Image (cartoon, rainbow, N blue to C red):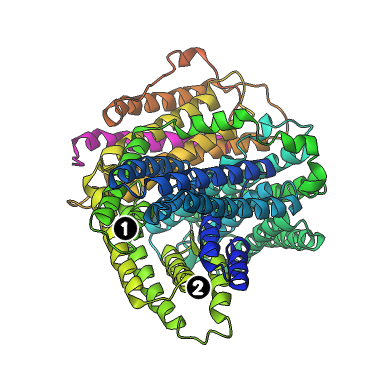
Amino acid sequence: MALSGTLPIIWGLATGKLSEAVWITLTAEAVCWVELKGSFSWRVRTLFTGAALAMIFSTIGTFTGTNIWMSMVAMFIAGYLATLLKSIGDRASGLALCVYMLFIICNAYPAKEFPEIKHRLALVAIGASWPVIVGIFVSLLMPVQEPFRRQIALIWRSIAVLVTTISKGGADKNKREFSEDILLKEKDVRTAIDNSYQFYDRMAHQVNKKNNQQYQLSLLRKNAGLVAVNITAMGEEMEHINIPQLDETLRVKAATLFSAMNEAVNRISVFIVTLKPEEKLLAMSHISRLKKLLALIREYPFPTDHKQTTAIKRILQLTDRTIKLMESAIQRIEHMGKDIPVYRSYSFLKTTFVLRPQYLYSNLRVLFNTTSHTTRYALRSAIAATLALFIFKWFHIDHGYWLPFSVMIVIQPYFGATFKKGRDRIAGTLLGGIVGSLLLHLPTGLHIKEVILFFTFILMVYYLKKQYAIAVFIITLNLVLLFNIEMAYNDRIMITRAVCTIGGSLLAIASGYALLPTWDKKWLPSHLADAIYSNYEYFIATFYKEKTPSNWTRYKRASESKNSNVFDSFNRYIEEPGKEKSLAFYDLITYNVRITRDLNNIHLEQDEKKSIQNTIATSQQQNRINECHDEFVNILKYLPEYNPDIKLNTLNNTREISSPFMLNEAQMILLEKLIIELKTMQGDMEKLPHLSLA
């Protein structure tokens, strides 16, 4: 962003062609918002797609700008397509900006004569090509697997945050608040894993072992998921421990244990990215320290309270398993071998196949494979942006293109998110405009403003997903400085931009409330039904298959993703305007999350068994498994009330099927917990249909 945005400005200052430089910079900036997280081939295809979209919609904006009605039709198309791109996620959200940003700006400043149009499009072509060249050059220098490694490192980093949360033990919070904190951090881990699957969607068992690096990294990601399961299980055990009642020495040792675990996980995340031997040494050092602390705690006398002692021993057992997984993770990185730069691994022939037509076809299928949520969101955005463009054109508002631009930026799939983004955008714009105006009074000869402009390109990317209000402040600062380079700046422009930003944000918020709104009071029950049924499928795959599934993490991932969806839906439901909300769904969500955790832990116990056991479950165990299945079926009968479109496929001949493994003591305890959770859930669900969400 900094290189692509600043170098054209330097060229414009040196040659006196500032107007041309600004057009190049604006186009380059739009293409630069494309996130380069995936492999080299993915990056190349995305950069070329961004450049193509920039050219297409710049051309459409330039040709339609002189006619208000053609502009509105084109704005609707651009708004609809851009929203579909945003809905895909990180893979395409940057492409959306190439569509609506360049269309709106070119439409606001249309070219009328053919030579002017030709000159404009030539500048846009240069601006679109420049970041492609920079992006490909930078990507050629990066190690081949670095993007995948970074995605995995982010998973390990989120696990470190989970460890920190669990280490606090809810000392300053009640049991429910502590449980919710763990749930939120566990969800962050799941989000990090899901993000990695957006770019690298094959699991370990699907990767060709001949591609050793991809295979080892897929296993490394699986390792991270299993570490997260163990640590989450530690959090559940912490709920049974009264920390203030523990002996002070034991408390200190326990705190040190979690601290060492946090450091070990953090060092592994750094080692995954850097591959430096010294980082491996640090990670191994922290793991060694963790082993010693584990041995010391085991030698210490435990509390007399049986429940607390059982919980502590279980935490120590889970820690031991986590250590093995961390050691395995380091081995995976070593087995991966040296990660060579792209330019050394991609032959010319291989590079020529990067832009194959089937990729375009598959991407178009993803783009237009819409759901009712996506379609409503796209129509809402397109209509609101078209209305904003009409107001700008009809009333001939100077710099009024900020109206549709703000609408497209602020509007989100859900009202709560739109309201928050609108509030942050208004605050960031006003503050950025004030600071930018003050900076314009700095001496011009020192080129301080140009230096600040360079750093704003970097900082706005850095803060975009961390603190949106700060990002908007920096973007506003960037635009104030950019406009001042091209033309004499005046306060009226900044005031107009502030008013249009406020107006566009308010229009986006109003559209989110009144125009094809998506309310979670309607969709929350549907998400809950999907999450419960996903757990049922996970349960069937665990106990009613011919053998224990080796790829059980696929079911784990599906259930955890559905749990994340329903939890997000619940949080949006709570933030929606209207009468007092019912919290009954929260308990059902937590029951379902605990069921997923129990199933995860049953599989972890099975993986820990030293030898392959061909012995099936005992008759007593099978009876309890069948009872658990019956409890599941009792719950499934309520699901059509929550989601009329759900398709249920229940197992009818459970008495004729035996579990493929004999359960050990720990697995039997987990099975009993499953039955308790299911019975409690059924009791709450009997009351829930009578609760109104309207």
Q: Position of residue 567 (x, y in %)?
A: 38, 46
The residue positioned 31% from the left and 60% from the top of the image is: 400
Q: Nearer the viewer, residue 451 or 642?
A: 451
Q: Position of residue 519 (x, y in %)?
A: 27, 43
Q: Quadrant of the C terminus?
A: top left
The residue stretch that appears in magenta? 666-694
Q: Amino acid at mark 1?
A: Leu
Label 1 and label 2: CA atoms lie apart by 23 Å
Q: Report whether 263 appears left or right of 620.
A: right
Instruction: Point out which mark residue 174 bears.
Output: none
* Looking at the image, residue 649 lies above or below residue 100: above
Q: Quadrant of residue 253?
A: bottom right
Badge 2 element: helix
Residue on which disc 1 sits: 403
Residue that label 2 marks: 485
Point out residue 516 in the picture as x, y percentages from the top left corner.
Answer: 25, 41
Residue beneath the point at 37% across and 24% down: 633
